[in-house]
Image (cartoon, rainbow, N blue to C red):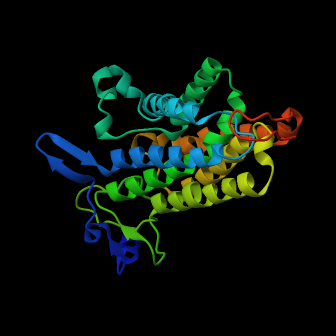
Amino acid sequence: MILSVLAAAGHIRFEDLGLHPDVFSIGFFTLRWYSLAYIAGILVGWWYLLKLLAQPGAPMARRHADDLVFYATLGIILGGRIGYVLFYAPEMILHPLNILRLWDGGMSFHGGVIGTSLGIILFARRHGLNWLRVHDYVACAVPFGLFFGRLANFVNGELWGKPTDVPWGIVFENTVPFGMAEPARHPSQLYEAGLEGVLLFAVLAFAFWRTKARYDPGKLVGLFLLGYGLARFTVEFFREPDRQLRDFAEATGLHMGQWLCVPMILAGLYLMLTAAERRVRVEPTWGTESVA
């Protein structure tokens, strides 16, 4: 405990940053940064997706992209919430009404990925599109949502990291039992915003704009799964496990988030290594030229 007190000395205190989970409140309505992050991620991701679709060989048209937003949004919300309940809070099954309380927080990215993927598959089958190539394009836009989401986690003062004495450590509130001194902690939310948001976006953008990766079905989504999986797996070493899953982390040696990243990493590697085998002549759904 003495080391924790010393670690907190001279560090930034979260309460001094003047951040608050709510943007504003009007009567019974409250707009939270977390909700705004989801909205911003979807809108900016949609805008960027249109930029990608304007290039030769696109797997769908503008009208398809507009329809896709509905499927993706539904997949994100349903998959993210159901995934959170199954992976992180199964006790909520005994209180079904609590599952509907989205405003209280509690979303799983891994569940959101599954939900969005199922939504894309249904969307592609309905319109007769190549679902894997649609995944490639959508994957390039996902880092926007990850970036905004992790910033919202930071503003909420949640999902903080482990105690540390690094100069940029932050003293968050209510991380230890009442009466104990709060230690400085890794701002793991910002680590994830940087790796899962900024860096992953840069890698995918380079692959899309500077290589022919988008013509190998599955390569870009594979790169996304691999990149996110490695980034999340790494950051979890600096992050405190969810309180209800601390015993699980101690028993298995890894956090739940890390275990969920293992199949993502393996799937990403598989899709990337086999992408060239799936390459065929690409006739554009929207654009002006064929791509070999």
Residue at image location 28% in from the left, 23% down from the top: 97
Q: Is residue 289 left or right of residue 174?
A: right
- The one of 1 and 89 positioned closer to us in this rendering: 89
Q: Is residue 261 visible?
A: no
Q: How many marks?
A: 0
Q: Position of residue 60 (x, y in %)?
A: 65, 33
- The one of 108 and 251 positioned closer to us in this rendering: 108
Q: Is residue 183 left or right of residue 247?
A: left
Q: Is residue 96 visible?
A: yes
Q: Position of residue 159 (x, y in %)?
A: 41, 52
- The one of 24 and 283 positioned closer to us in this rendering: 283
Up/down of 161 relative to 219, above or below: below
Q: Is residue 213 left or right of residue 196?
A: right
Q: Position of residue 77 (x, y in %)?
A: 43, 32
Residue at image location 42% in from the left, 49% down from the top: 40
Occupied quadrant, residue 100: top left
Seen as rendered, the residue at the extreme top is 126
Q: Position of residue 182 (x, y in %)?
A: 32, 65
Residue at image location 35% in from the left, 79% down from the top: 9
Up/down of 142 relative to 185, above or below: above
Occupied quadrant, residue 10: bottom left
